[in-house]
Amino acid sequence: MQEGSAIQLQVKTILNRIQAFVGFVYQDVRLCAGLGNAEQIEITVVPHGGIRGRCSACRRPAPGYDRLPERRWLFVPLWGIQTWFRYAPRRVECAEHGVAVEYIPWSDGKRPVTRAMMGFLARWARRLSWRETAQAFQTSWEAVYRSVEWFVEWGLEHRQLDGVTSIGVDEIHWGHGTKADNFLTVVYQSDAGCRRLLWIGKRRSEKTLRQGLKALGPEVVQGLRFVCSDMWKPYLNVLAAEAGQALHVLDRFHITMHMNQAVDEVRRAEGTPPKGQEQRGGQAAQEYALAVIAQRKPGAWRSPKEAQRASRQQAEHRSGMGVEGSLPALLEVQVPDLGRRLPRLLVPPCHAQSPGTDAESCPHVAQP
Ligand SMILES: [Zn+2]
């Protein structure tokens, strides 16, 4: 800090610097004894003499009407000491709304906690349990819970959904059993640089996902370029109907699982691969299995040789990816077997998260 710019530091100075409210003045800051003689800091706020109060409904300045009894709001603790705002709200006479309590910028309705403290608690509640948060900052579990609730509502109200081009849809299992109520559907944004939960709903039905897409709004859904989900049929149906323009990326884990099942089935049905191929390891066995499937499927558009070559190329492309290396060749066969109509199907998992790539520029994209 330059010489001459140093200031005498008081709590009031800090408050004015980081938490100034137009139309209000910090009158004084006192250290006093609270419950059980624990120390408390009380910050008294008064209206600015020359500025009229604002109607809480329309936020327009209005003539004063009367004054309500003083209230207290919990503020962010200073040096670990419980800290309170004290203020006696004015009522104003608004031309439009009649007599109304004034707009108090640090307050939200009847909540006894300042907005700053609610944000503070909600942020800590992401790192600690709600109980630990309450203990660490000398407040109640209820206060933490209400703060998180307020923070989430605030976040949803101010959420910006423009620029969402990729979403993922997933099911979460919770509790015991496999009843419909034991599942949740989550929708999340999966764009590079922005991954966040967008929506969560009970069950994993078509209705659930429709509600989720409705909550995002038609503009967001129509603007989607990539959608990622597993092979759960209700999701596939809804995504095909609602976001048919988006490239549908199937979840890597489930594809691998289905592929391994298919390979096992073929092995069982066709017996052992020819001598020699088996000794070259799992890759050769898969190629063999894929070739057999392709031969048996009249609709498959690759010959066995092409399928083998393609799967080998893919494997070279992605050395180290193990069995997933030969996915595209398999899916061309697998998907018709599922008997499900899919929107433009995309197989590899490399694109969902990058809005910068598109179907044309990516060598792994398989399109019907
Ligand atoms: Zn008003």
Image (cartoon, rainbow, N blue to C red):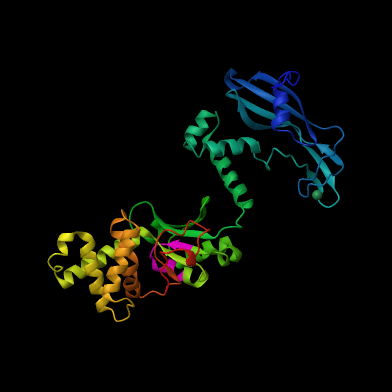
Left or right relative to 40: residue 101:
right
User: Can residue 113 be seen?
Assistant: no
**Residue 14 in view (yes/no):** yes
Tell me which residue sits at (55%, 38%) in the image. Answer: 123
Numbered circles on residues, count: 0
Where 73 sits versus 54, above or below? above
Q: Would residue 340 appear left or right of 40 to someone viewing this image?
A: left
Q: Looking at the image, which residue is at 54% across and 29% down?
A: 137
Residue 234 is one of the magenta-drawn residues? yes
Give how far across and how far down residue 17 sits, in percent. Answer: 72, 30
Q: Residue furthest bottom?
A: 298
Along the viewing direction, whichever of 147 and 125 lies nearer the viewer: 125
Residue 221 location, quadrant: bottom right
Q: Which quarter of the figure has residue 74?
A: top right
Residue 288 vertical placement versus 78 (above, below): below
Quadrant of residue 364 within the rendered picture: bottom left
Q: In the rendered view, tell whether residue 197 sits above or below residue 347.
A: above
The stretch drawn in magenta includes residue 62: no
Q: Is residue 299 left or right of residue 53?
A: left
Query: Residue 172 in the image: x percent, y percent?
Result: 40, 55
Q: Nearer the viewer, residue 317 or 198?
A: 317
* Rendered location of residue 113, percent (x, y): 63, 36
Magenta residues, start to end: 227-238
Residue 44 vertical placement versus 155 (above, below) = above
Q: Nearer the viewer, residue 243 or 137?
A: 243
- Decide which of 225, 357 is in the foreground and name it: 357
Residue 25, x across and y down, in percent: 78, 30
Q: Residue at x 57, y 24 (%)?
A: 80
Q: Quadrant of the C terminus?
A: bottom left
